[in-house]
Image (tube, helix red, strand yellow):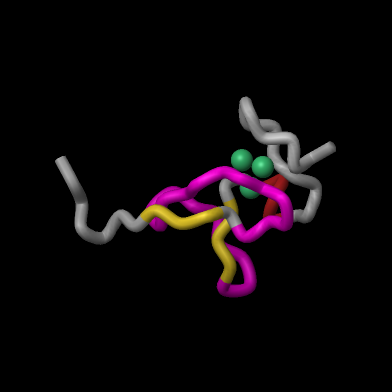
């Protein structure tokens, strides 16, 4: 099922390639992040993403 309110967007963290949905994203300062790590500027540990390196 498709929820019309569930929008996919790119994580706002620099160099992060994760997509996040508006319903599950971490929101901080009007930006959306895939994880708390990205919101804190450290980067995430999701598979296939090396933004934390
Ligand atoms: Zn990432
Ligand atoms: Zn991210
Ligand atoms: Zn991520």
Q: For this view, does 43 lie left or right of residue 9?
A: right
Q: Which residue lies at the image location 62% right of the left edge and 60% below the top edge?
A: 12
Q: For this view, does 34 lie left or right of residue 42?
A: left
Taking 37 as reference, is 39 above or below it? below
Q: For this view, does 50 lie left or right of residue 48?
A: right
Taking 28 as reference, is 34 above or below it? above
Magenta residues, dominant SS class: loop
> How many labels, in total?
0
Rendered-image quadrant of the N terminus: top left
Q: For this view, does 2 lie left or right of residue 50?
A: left
Closer to the camera in the image, 24 or 48: 48
| Residue farthest bottom in this picture | 30
Closer to the camera in the image, 14 or 30: 14
| Residue farthest right in this picture | 53
Percent x, y for residue 21? 41, 51
> Residue 29 colored magenta?
yes
Percent x, y for residue 8? 39, 53
Q: Which residue lies at the image location 50% right of the left edge and 47% below the top edge?
A: 19
Percent x, y for residue 34? 57, 47
Image-quadrant location for residue 5: bottom left
Rendered-image quadrant of the C terminus: top right
Q: Which residue lies at the image location 58% right of the left edge and 67% below the top edge?
A: 31
Taking 29 as reference, is 41 above or below it? above
Numbered range of the magenta stretch: 12-30
Ligand 1 position by quadrant: top right
Percent x, y for residue 3? 20, 51
């Amino acid at each position: 099922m498709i929820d019309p309110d569930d929008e996919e967007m790119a994580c706002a963290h620099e160099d992060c390639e994760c997509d996040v949905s508006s319903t599950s994203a971490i929101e901080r300062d009007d930006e959306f992040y895939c994880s708390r790590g990205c919101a804190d500027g450290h980067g995430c540990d999701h598979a296939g993403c090396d933004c934390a390196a």
